Every structure is written in C-alpha cells, then in structure tokens.
Amino acid sequence: MENSAKKILIIEDDKFLRQLIARKLTAENYEIAEAVDGEEGIKKVQEEKPDLVLLDLILPGIDGFEVLSRIKKDETIASIPVIILSNLGQKEDIEKGFNLGAADYLIKAHFTPGEIIDKAREMLSD
C-alpha cells in the first residue's frame, strides 16, 4: 500500500461547516477537495476520484440525492464511498440515502465534527 494521503471530497454549501471539517481532516493528514453545490460536486468526484465523499443533501442546484444517484450510476466512480451529512433526519430521507448507495448517513445535529472525522477514518481504514 503506497503511503499517499487519502483524498476526501466535501460537498457542502455551508462555508463554516465545510471549512471546519476540511481543517480537521487536513490536520489528520487527509488531502481535501471541496465543492459548494451539486453540479460542482459531481464534476469534482469525476476529476479528483477521491477515496471518500462527504455529501450534504440540501445543496444549491441539484440536491445531494441527485448527486449520489449520479455518482452511483457512473461506473468510473460508483465504488467511491459516500457518507451523507445532513440535517434531514426523517426515516424516509435516511432510507432514500441508503437505497441510493450511501455508505453511511450522519445527521449533522447528532454528530460533532470530531465524530464525523472518526466516521471518515473508520470508512477509509477498511
């Protein structure tokens, strides 16, 4: 296994949260890419081929569900794990996320940024 940093793409329109998570991940030696909306997110996944995607659902333009669905339909990037990071905590939303292929679904209000990083680390260590 080469010793290159794992790359995590954060698709999140909340600048404060995005920068907070990016800072914490950078401190853990992850390489970070960022996108602020769905279209940019999909483009970045295709271009950067990150090891993991942290995806918000409420995004300008196309929403996170659509982003996830497009990622999973694209064979070149379908295997990249996506962790949904959202304030949408309804059972239907969570089920929809998993049905579309999310690796995990974290409700922002229930997790601190530190715990989000732990989840990302867990996901990347398997």
Image (tube, rainbow, N blue to C red):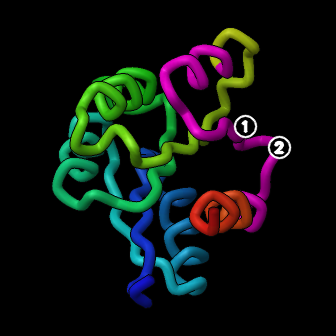
Mark 2 in CB contact with mark 1 (< 8 angstroms): yes
Element carrying mark 2: helix
Where residue 105 appears, as percent x and y from the top left, is 66, 36
Residue at (29% x, 44% y) in the render: 77
Q: Residue furthest right?
A: 110
Q: Name the amino acid, label 2.
A: His
Q: In which quarter of the image is residue 84?
A: top right
**For residue 29, above or below residue 14:** below
Say if 32 sits above or below 34 in the image.
below
Q: What element carries label 1?
A: strand
Q: Which residue is drawn at 67% across and 21% down?
A: 94
Which quadrant of the rendered structure holds the C terminus? bottom right
Q: Provide residue 111's location: percent of width, then percent of height.
A: 79, 50
- Reply yes or no: does residue 108 show up in magenta: yes
Q: Which residue is drawn at 60% across and 24% down?
A: 98
Which image quarter is the N terminus in? bottom left
Question: Which numbered dot is residue 107?
Answer: 1
Work out whether 13 lies above or below 75: below
How packed mark 2 is, by other alpha carbons closer than 10 Å (few <14, some 14-19, many 20 or more), is few
Please tell me in which quadrant of the rendered image residue 31 appears.
bottom left
Q: What residue is disc 2 on?
A: 110
Give percent across and percent down for residue 20: 57, 68
In the rendered view, does 82 fall on the left or right side of 116?
left
Q: Is residue 30 left or right of residue 110?
A: left
Q: Does the magenta stretch include residue 115?
A: yes
**Which stretch is magenta?**
94-116
| Nearest the eye: 110 or 45 | 45
